[in-house]
Structure formats: structure tokens, C-alpha cells
Image: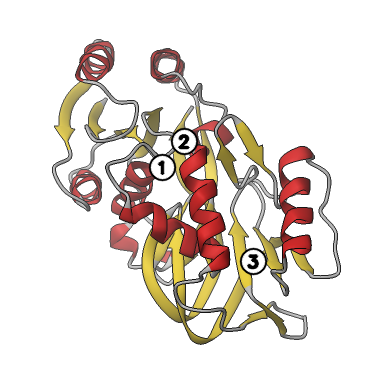
Amino acid sequence: MRAILVVNPQATSTTAGGRDVLAHALASQVKLDVVETDYRGHAMAVARSAARDGIDLVVAHGGDGTVNEVVNGLLADADGDPAGIGDVPMLGVVPGGSANVFARALGIAHDPVEATHQLLNAIENDRSRKVGLGLADGHWFTFNAGMGWDADVVGRVAKRRGKQTTAGLYLRAAVASHLRPPLGRPPLTVRIPGEEPTEVLTAFVSNTDPWSYLGDRPVHLNPGSSFDTGLGLFALSGLRLPTVFKHVRQALLTKSDQRGRRLLRHDDLPMIRIDAAEPVNFQVDGDLVGQRTRVEFFSVPGALTVTV
């Protein structure tokens, strides 16, 4: 088996020593090349080349941003068309970030050493699983995407890149974005097949559950979502403090279905279209993509094989 280990040395919990241990362990089972990323988009370029060169396995060692880049590189030649997905390398993940949402949702250990043992065991026993992905405006996402408030938060956190992305940093960014939304609060119109259009102020789209983590605490928005189902939608038509506190509390304290007068929630959707009256921030897998006035989100079942 030919494999490439893609390491983001800037990720929160990656170290040179950890990289060397991981590389040595992998090299005992596969023919391995190691690439450290030097710039944003480097992991995507490496994964795209690996897919074209017929590599068997690409292992991402970094945070969710690194995993997202690798996934988008592996599927780059599909040109955003699910029907265009051919034979692509398997994906392996050894967490190296702060949240590692995708890895945790797959049952991969948060600790890189434990995750390495899991990966080696999966390779030795030829163990893998198919996972569904989301596709939004040509960008593949593994666990979530959104427009509005959550994307505003992601944008604020990105401006402080270089600082450790702690739960406290996200909470401060969430409060600041709620009180002073950078682009205002233009209404969003959500369109779902078979349903009447609904106007909301922020929309979260899930490909799995939990939707994210605050430290060790999972955030549950659509408990019915998984890598084997369609997309989950969680949207709020009001963002007054009582509404926000109610749903934040439900998201952090329970895995039961959320309910509320201001809540629009669906599970297992094949597609969602969101139109904005004015440009709003748009994020995928915790990275700000830019501003959009329209995004279509699609569920793509079994898009990728993960060694796990």
C-alpha cells in the first residue's frame, strides 16, 4: 500500500516528535511519503496529486481545516459533481487540532498516539467505512456548514489565527458577533423540496452529530444526522437573547430533539437552498469561505472511504 502523510505543523496539538512517531509507525506497514504543509491550500494540492497518482491512502494529521482540505483535494477532479467521483484514495485521520469534530464523530481517539494505534489496527485488518459528505457551492464539507451568525463567528476567530482556538475564544466571538454582526442581519430564505419557503436569520447545516464541540462538550443541533443520512437543518427566525439562550442550553445539555417557536429544524434532507437578501458570511467545516447571496447544499451518500 502506498500512502502519504499530510501534516499541518501549525495545528494546535501537532508536534515534531508526534509527527516522527506517527510517520515511523505508518512506515512499518505502508510505503510512506511525508509532506508538511507550508501554506493554506497546500494539503488540498497534495491530496489532489495523490488521487491522480493512484495513491492508496492519504492520512491527514491536523485539525478539521486540514481534513477538509485533504477531502476537497481527493475529490477535486469530480468538479463538484457527485456523479464524477471515481476511484480516490482512502482517507485516514490522526487528530491534531483543537475540536477535531470529524474525527470524534467517527470514533477516532482525541489523543494522537491513541489515534495512531487505531489507524494502524485499521490498516492491518483492512477496516474502513463509507461516509456521506455535504457539498455546498462547490465545497465539500465533512460535518457542518452555515450562513449567518455561525459564519460570522468563524470569521472573527479566523482573524485571531495564531492564537489557540479555545472554547473561550469561540464564546467571545459568538457574543461579539451577536451584539455587533459584521454584515448586519439580512434575512435568509430557506427552500426545502416539498416545503414552503421560510425566512430565518441564521442557518446551520449538519452532516453529522454533534455539530461541533466547545472544549469536551458536544453541541447537538440535529441528533438525527449522521454520515449515513442526509443533511440536517437548524435555522432560527429570531435571535433575541431569550431565544438564543434557550437553544444554546438545549444544544449543550441534551441530545433530545430541539423545539421552539423560532426554530426551523429538519433531518435527513437531500438538499437545501438558502438565499440571502444581501451578502452574508458562509463557512464550511469551521473555515470562512467568503460571502454569498445564494448557496445550495447537497447530501452526497458514500462519497468517501475512511480507514477507521
Name the residue that disc number 1 marks: 64
The answer to whether residue 298 of the structure is visible from this angle is no
Q: Which of the marked residues, 3 or 1, is nearer the chain's N terminus? A: 1
Q: Quadrant of the N terminus?
A: top left
Determine which of the numbered discs, if any, sits on residue 270 in the image. Answer: 3
Q: Position of residue 197 (x, y in %)?
A: 72, 85
Between residues 157 and 126, which one lies in front from this camera angle?
157
Label 2, secondary structure: give it.
Answer: loop
Q: Position of residue 135 (x, y in %)?
A: 48, 63
Q: Position of residue 8 (x, y in %)?
A: 24, 35
Q: Which residue is located at x 54 percent, y 47 percent?
A: 171
Q: Which colour scheme appears in the figure?
A: secondary structure
Q: Which of the marked residues, 2 or 3, is nearer the chain's N terminus? A: 2
* Amino acid carrying mark 2 in the image: Asn
The quadrant holding residue 260 is: bottom right
Asked if residue 118 lies left or right of residue 107, the reply is: left
Q: Which of the marked residues, 1 or 2, is nearer the chain's N terminus? A: 1
Instruction: Estimate how packed mark 3 is, as few (under 14), some (14 to 19) or many (20 or more) residues with alpha carbons within 10 Å.
Output: some
The answer to whether residue 247 of the structure is visible from this angle is yes
Between residues 148 and 55, which one lies in front from this camera angle?
148
Is the residue 191 above or below the residue 167 in the image? below
* Amino acid carrying mark 1 in the image: Asp
State how far apart marks 2 and 3 are (Cα): 25 Å
Which label sits in the foreground, 2 or 3?
Answer: 2
